Amino acid sequence: MSRHVISKKDYKNLKERVSKYNIDISNLENIEIDNSKKNEIYYFSGKPIFYNGIPTLYLINYLKVGNKTVTVDDGAVPHIENGSNLFAPGIIDMDKTIKKDEMVFIKNKDNLFIAIGNASDDYDKIIESKKGEAVKIIHYFRDKIMES
């Protein structure tokens, strides 16, 4: 199937799907979809914004999401940008409402979102232990989503 602008009904559906991550796409117009056998990709201004049910870094950086964020130190950035999971010692700030298995948005100290992942534990446990895996990365700058 070729890429085409979504209908109002599909836009409403997408808006609901994205809202579960506390993301509001109300100001985005002319969203396109490319629905192949393997992938469902939504585009805004030619950039992928929602890939197989996952918001992309393009969308997160465009909208500057403000919740469920984790800020990392400079030492963690290159590892995360290569797809490594985030470990607790690399965290310098974290949203206190984060719960285990929730989708979180990882940013560097300059507030550029560099990855999306799922929290390995609740905020309290991650901060208390300050060791071990904190976030399992599911999307990062150099992955197949960014090449879409």
Image (spheres, grey):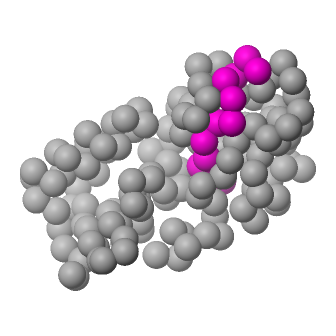
Residue found 76% across the figure and 21% down from its top: 125
Residue 115 belongs to the span the image colors magenta = yes
Q: Is residue 48 left or right of residue 10?
A: right
* Number of numbered callouts drawn: 0
Q: Is residue 36 left or right of residue 53?
A: left
Based on the displayed image, in which of its 4 quarters is residue 79 positioned? Answer: bottom right
Q: Residue furthest bottom?
A: 2
Based on the displayed image, in which of its 4 quarters is residue 26 positioned? Answer: top left
Residue 5, above or below 67? below
Residue 127 horizontal/vertical position (percent) = 80, 22
Q: Is residue 46 left or right of residue 26?
A: right
Residue 141, above or below 113? below
Residue 13, above or below 143? above
Residue 25 horizontal/vertical position (percent) = 31, 44
Q: Is residue 26 left or right of residue 20?
A: left
Residue found 17% across the figure and 45% down from its top: 12
Residue found 77% across the figure and 26% down from its top: 126
The foreground one among 72 and 1 is 1
Residue 95 visible from this viewpoint:
no
Based on the displayed image, in which of its 4 quarters is residue 102 positioned? Answer: top right
Residue found 44% across the figure and 52% down from its top: 55
Residue 81 belongs to the span the image colors magenta = no
The foreground one among 16 and 108 is 16
Residue 141 horizontal/vertical position (percent) = 63, 64
Residue 17 visible from this viewpoint:
yes
Give the position of the N terminus as an image quadrant.
Answer: bottom left
Stretch in magenta = 113-125
